[in-house]
Image: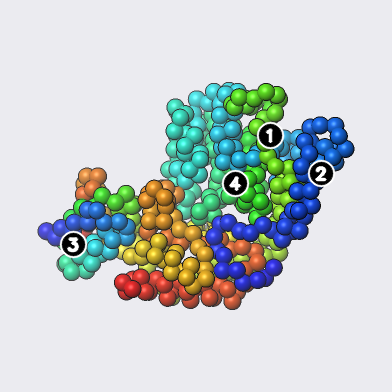
Amino acid sequence: MGSVTGNFTSESALHPAARAVFLDAIDRGWADPAKIHDSSRALDHLLHESKAIFSERLGVDQLMLSFLGEPNLGHFLAISGLTLAQPAPQIFFPTTSRQEVLEVMGSHPGSTALAVDLDGSYSIPVASHDDLLILPTVNGETGSISPDPSSFKGRIFVDATASPLQPLPENWSVALWDSRSWSGPAGLGILAIRDSGRWINPLPHLDHRSVPGTFNPALAIASAVALDGFVKDCATSEVRTGHFNKLIRRFVTDEIGDVDIASPESARAEFLSFSFLYVDALQLVEKMNRRGFSIDSGSACTSANLEPSHVLAAMGRLTHGNVRIRLHSDVVESEIHRLLAALKECVEELRDGK
Amino acid sequence: MTHVDALGKRCPLPIIMIAKAVGTTQRGEVLTLSSDDPATWPDLQAWGRLTGKVVKQVEATHFEITA
């Protein structure tokens, strides 16, 4: 740790602790944990140990947890499973919800998009017992934290795929996490169903399982180790990350200028999204890459469909010239200074038409 | 009235073009902008907020800006 990586994207390499156990997990994780052979039982035991880690770190009883081989399927499973068990007269979701949620919402009549303000915040609606709220605990672009939903009387699907660090609200019904958000291996989601009597598997299924069951056990074992390490790293680096966040905000405002910072100060400090006026984000990302820095962008020119980030647009934030930075826990101050110097140089070049 | 035709231009060009045009006009003058880029309306509103300009969407691809 502490190495200079130049990586400020939302993705990150496998956590070192998970990498250290990964081959061993592959060696032990080949059997079918549902069978009765020794290898199967040993793997079943390992998976239970992994679930115990997930349970402790995510704050959920381990009997409620299922592993998903395709995390993005989880949004559909959660929402459709809840509405199949009990139709929801109204489904509320913030306009800044993930694209996967918006796609599921498109096929649900009676869904209501909740408008957000400049900080990405919104009001928790008044609801009946059967209504459903989609609550992204943390916005994956800006780091905005959802408002406290304790006043919501209906059911809540918590989309925790952007970060495992925000605690679940007390009145959650179904929750979803993505292993990638804690430097775990890709290809693993975790679905928690609080009350299995109030959720019906919406997919064709042969048995009582709530998920297809085609996850890779080795990934689950490595992911649990990654989560454990990630939470400890974040606790250690929390103050430093907050300091870096402020440093970047000050620099882009004072030293570069004409910038719209989309992440509110109340957002999680490891997330930072800001947009430079009069700058082409695609060229900016390319220029930064040539200088050894990987950054993300929500601008239209960097997206496959040439549409600007729906999150920035919903918040009323500038969508062009957008830069998204993720402050990983191993980043060091000298790297931040180099990043900022490169950003200033690149933005100035682009504004000068170079 | 100054008109800026940014049809077919991708972000951030429509905003750059309107900002340049605003720079050459008198305060309070109304400019019009044509742009079919999907980012123009959200960006024009954000630009208006950042620079203190009043912006209005007249039609899907037609906008008014008060310098």
Relative height, residue B60 to residue A107 (above, below):
below
Q: Is residue B46 or residue A42 the one in the foreground? A: A42
Looking at the rendered image, the disc whose residue lies closer to the viewer, 3 or 1, is: 1
Question: What whole-number distance in Å separates the C-alpha atoms at marks 1 and 2?
Answer: 16 Å
Protein chain holding label 1: A
The image quadrant of residue A1 is bottom right
State the residue position of label 3. B28
In the rendered image, residue B47, in percent from the top left (x then y), is placed at 32, 59
The kind of residue on which mark 2 rests is Leu
Q: Nearer the viewer, residue A90 or B61?
A: B61
Looking at the rendered structure, the secondary structure element under dot 3 is loop
| Residue type marked 3 | Gly
Disc 4 marks which residue?
Answer: A161
Q: Earlier in the sequence, mark 4 or mark 2?
A: 2
Residues at discs 1 and 4 in contact (Cβ within 8 Å):
no
Amino acid type of disc 1?
Gly
Alpha-carbon neighbours of circle 3 within 10 Å: few (<14), some, or many (≥20)?
Answer: few
Residue labelled with disc 1 = A213
Q: Name the residue under label 2.
A: A46
Q: Nearer the viewer, mark 1 or mark 4?
A: 1
| Residue A182 at least partly seen | yes
Q: Which chain carries label 3?
A: B
